[in-house]
Image: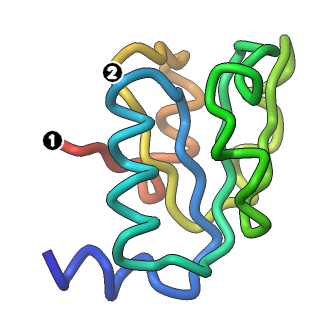
Amino acid sequence: MNNIINKLKDKNVAILGFGKEGYSSYKYLRKHLPKQKLTIIDRNVNLKESYKELTNDSSIDVIVGDHYLDNLEQYDFIIKTPGISLQVSLIEKLKNKLTSQM
């Protein structure tokens, strides 16, 4: 547990997909890294209305909409949920940055 927290600490981290697993990742990271800047990335434009605590989190950025997959290379680590399907070329480009709960 501490290894992943130490690896993510002070890094530019994004959670890609914010369903059950993405929300679980968010809660885990907030428990262990409460002030670290995080970015939530999802296609759902109503995400903040569904998860009110995102509005109250001053260390969070939320990227939603049709272009949610743009600029993924800017993150040090991307915690991808299984519901997000990426093109092989994008996976290849991001392979050293992608991780998941698994």
- Residue appearing at x 57%, y 43% in the figure: 93
Please tell me whether residue 45 is drawn above or below residue 36 in the rendered image.
Answer: above
Report the side of 96 relative to 34 (left or right).
left
The disc placed on residue 86 is none
Q: In which quadrant of the rendered image does the C terminus lie?
A: top left
Q: Position of residue 34 (x, y in %)?
A: 51, 77
- Residue appearing at x 40%, y 14% in the figure: 83
- Tell me which numbered mark, 1 or 2, is placed earlier along the sequence: 2
Q: Quadrant of residue 59?
A: bottom right
Along the viewing direction, whichever of 71 and 79 lies nearer the viewer: 79
Q: Position of residue 8 (x, y in %)?
A: 43, 76
Q: Position of residue 54 (x, y in %)?
A: 69, 45
Q: Position of residue 91 (x, y in %)?
A: 49, 33
Q: Quadrant of residue 10?
A: bottom right
- Residue appearing at x 60%, y 78% in the figure: 36
Along the viewing direction, whichever of 93 and 30 lies nearer the viewer: 30
Please tell me whether residue 87 is drawn above or below residue 22 in the rendered image.
Answer: above
What colour scheme was applied to this rendering of the protein?
A: rainbow
Q: Which residue matches tag 2?
A: 82
Report the side of 55 relative to 86 (left or right).
right
Disc 1 is placed on an element classified as: loop
Please tell me whether residue 58 is drawn above or below residue 83 in the rendered image.
Answer: below
- Residue appearing at x 38%, y 29% in the figure: 81
Q: In which quadrant of the rendered image does the N terminus lie?
A: bottom left
The disc placed on residue 102 is 1
Disc 2 is placed on an element classified as: loop
| Crowding at mark 2 (Cα within 10 Å: few <14, some 14-19, many 20+) | some
Along the viewing direction, whichever of 26 and 73 lies nearer the viewer: 26
Q: CA distance from mark 1 to mark 2?
A: 9 Å
* Mark 1–mark 2 CB contact (< 8 Å): yes
